[in-house]
């Protein structure tokens, strides 16, 4: 027995050493933590239970049988807890064969994916690797595909989060791309399908890894990543915060945490949030922050398409997804990027039964050749489709403009919202007064006085919440200061909501 215990300790120590002191030092010198250090930070202290520490590759090609086998084979896997809730995790170990994926390495990840799905618990992947283990060829490619298929099987059943903390290229990028959220670390992580050398060969473009796929690119241009943080520690702490907003699965319901914030809290300052001039911007984040518990708002994709704000907060301890037009950016207009960004978020919330609160101040869809050529019709339809298929509770508050098709799209009563409120400053119409009068009274445009009178009468009649309220499209016109209290009551009521869609194999969202 003593021999076995000694052997166990020796083998454990060998596995825990990873690629050895020199490679660990090199990892630290790059400002990166090791695979195990990252897990320690992600999970509750002492909660990590590791699996498959002794797994080794079985490759015999290119001298791999003679090369030292390293137990664990470049990925650390297991489960633990985040604030007491079970979470599965795999963490690529760059110090072992560059974290590259062998058949055995893939087997460790798929085992964790299967367990997470069986246990209906979230899974987090920490990426820092050189792609497919080159010596293994098709066995590695097959391993990737096994992981991809499981990503798809788990999609909409358990939350899947990917954190990119080093190189992530080739086969490694497509698994994160099929998960719910991608988090990157600034300066030390990058993602691309093919790296700068291949790009140079194929397209003759000269580009650095950072320029091709760094955090800045993916959070501002491509929108592949949802957020980026300064270093490993901050990224992992923020992932813990994100997990706290998410249900464990699509059947568990959103988590409810203790709140120390009065649900009936009034915010008199909101009564003056909307400026007197219809064209003056204001920060919609102020409304979100003053609405949620303890002002704790977790924004997603903050720098991409800033004309729409998305993210999580809590009201009375319950997780809520927020979608809000942002008058501070492009007057809050809906363009292709904003529509796509919001549509994916709405679908995420709906998968996991997270109620959605929508704050509307939208002058319409963005006109222009670039938008039309860029597929605005199809991207706008994504958001319309996403809201229309929601069965999760939807509450909408129109704070100011709700013009044209964008009124319909932004969780209107007509496409299925459960509770629709408007502030007294709401303007619900086909378009603004000036544009409307120019079209319907084109023949009178020479008569300035008449046009001014017609504009005023259009404003009086249509640029208010009451035409919509008279028809029942708005359930109630509420004082801005009572928004939080009304939302809290509404969300409590809607927690019992049951809605069903007709059977189909799956829908055909305009991708
Ligand atoms: C085997 C690999 C490896 C790989 C790195 N290593 N990538 N071993 N297969 N794919 C090993 C190195 O040999 C080295 O081993 C250690 O990891 C560290 O690598 P370095 O090159 O010294 O590190 P660095 O200079 O930091 O460069 C990191 C890197 C580079 C940029 C990731 O290693 C690299 O370009 N690797 C290859 C990337 C790639 O082309 N992968 C295949 C993608 S195709 P030692 O023993 O010296 O420490 C793909 C297809 C799948 O993934 C498609 C599925 C859909």
Image (cartoon, helix red, strand yellow):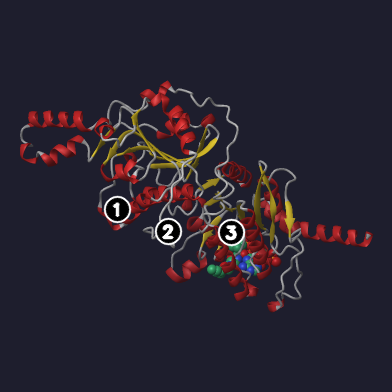
Tell me the tag on residue 463.
Answer: none
Whether residue 453 is visible, yes or no, is: yes
Between label 1 and label 2, give the one nearer the viewer: 2
Q: Give the residue drawn at x 37%, y 49%.
A: 388
Q: Which residue is mark 2?
A: 503
Q: SS of the residue at dot 1?
A: helix
Q: Which residue is mark 3?
A: 167
Between label 1 and label 3, give the one nearer the viewer: 1
Q: Earlier in the sequence, mark 1 or mark 3?
A: 3
Q: Give the residue drawn at x 29%, y 46%.
A: 365
Disc 3 Cβ-to-ligand 1 distance below 8 Å: yes
Tell me the tag on residue 371.
Answer: 1
- Whole-angstrom CA distance, mark 1 to mark 2, is 35 Å
Q: Earlier in the sequence, mark 1 or mark 2?
A: 1
* x then y, percent, for residue 472: 29, 35
Q: SS of the residue at dot 2?
A: loop
* x then y, percent, for residue 317: 55, 34
């Amino acid at each position: 027995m003593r021999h076995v215990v000694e052997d166990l300790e020796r083998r454990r120590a060998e596995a825990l050493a990873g690629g050895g002191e020199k490679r660990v030092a090199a990892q630290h010198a790059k400002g990166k933590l090791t695979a195990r250090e990252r897990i320690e930070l992600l999970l509750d202290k002492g909660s990590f239970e590791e699996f498959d520490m002794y797994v080794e590759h079985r490759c015999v090609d290119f001298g791999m049988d003679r090369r030292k086998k390293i137990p664990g084979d470049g990925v650390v896997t297991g489960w633990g807890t985040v604030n007491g809730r079970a979470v599965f995790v795999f963490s690529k170990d760059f110090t072992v064969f560059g974290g590259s994926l062998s058949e055995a390495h893939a087997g460790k990840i798929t085992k964790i994916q299967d367990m997470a799905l069986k246990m209906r618990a979230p899974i987090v992947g920490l990426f820092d690797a050189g792609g497919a283990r080159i010596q293994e060829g098709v066995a590695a490619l097959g391993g990737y595909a096994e992981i991809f298929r499981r990503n798809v099987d788990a999609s909409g059943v358990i939350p899947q989060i990917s954190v990119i903390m080093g190189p992530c290229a080739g086969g490694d990028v497509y698994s994160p791309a099929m998960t719910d959220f991608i988090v990157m670390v600034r300066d030390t992580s990058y993602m691309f399908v093919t790296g700068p050398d291949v790009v140079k060969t194929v397209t003759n473009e000269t580009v650095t890894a950072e320029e091709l796929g760094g955090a800045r690119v993916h959070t501002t241009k491509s929108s592949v990543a949802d957020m980026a943080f300064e270093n490993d520690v901050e990224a992992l702490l923020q992932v813990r915060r994100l997990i706290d907003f998410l249900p464990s699965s699509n059947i568990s319901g959103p988590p409810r945490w203790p709140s120390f914030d009065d649900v009936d809290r009034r915010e008199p300052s909101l009564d003056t949030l909307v400026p007197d001039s219809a064209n003056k911007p204001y920060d919609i984040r102020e409304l979100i922050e003053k609405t949620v518990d303890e002002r704790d708002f977790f924004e997603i994709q903050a720098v991409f398409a800033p004309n729409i704000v998305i993210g999580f907060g809590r009201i009375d301890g319950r997780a809520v997804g927020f979608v809000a037009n942002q008058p501070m950016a492009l007057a809050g207009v809906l363009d292709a990027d904003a529509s796509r960004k919001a549509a994916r978020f709405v679908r995420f919330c709906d998968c996991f039964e997270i109620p959605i609160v929508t704050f509307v101040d939208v002058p319409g869809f963005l006109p222009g050749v670039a938008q039309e050529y860029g597929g605005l019709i199809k991207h706008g339809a994504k958001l319309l489709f996403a809201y229309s298929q929601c069965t999760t509770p939807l509450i909408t508050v129109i704070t100011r403009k709700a013009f044209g098709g964008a009124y319909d799209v932004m969780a209107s009563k007509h496409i299925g919202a459960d509770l629709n409120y408007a502030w007294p400053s709401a303007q619900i119409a086909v378009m603004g007064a000036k544009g409307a009068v120019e079209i319907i009274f084109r023949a009178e445009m020479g008569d300035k006085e008449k046009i001014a009178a017609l504009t005023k009468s259009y404003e009086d009649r249509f640029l208010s919440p009451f035409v919509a309220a008279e028809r029942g499209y708005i359930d109630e016109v509420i004082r801005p200061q009572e928004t939080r209290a009304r939302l809290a009551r509404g969300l409590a009521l809607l927690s019992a909501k049951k809605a069903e869609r007709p059977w189909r194999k799956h829908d055909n969202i305009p991708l």
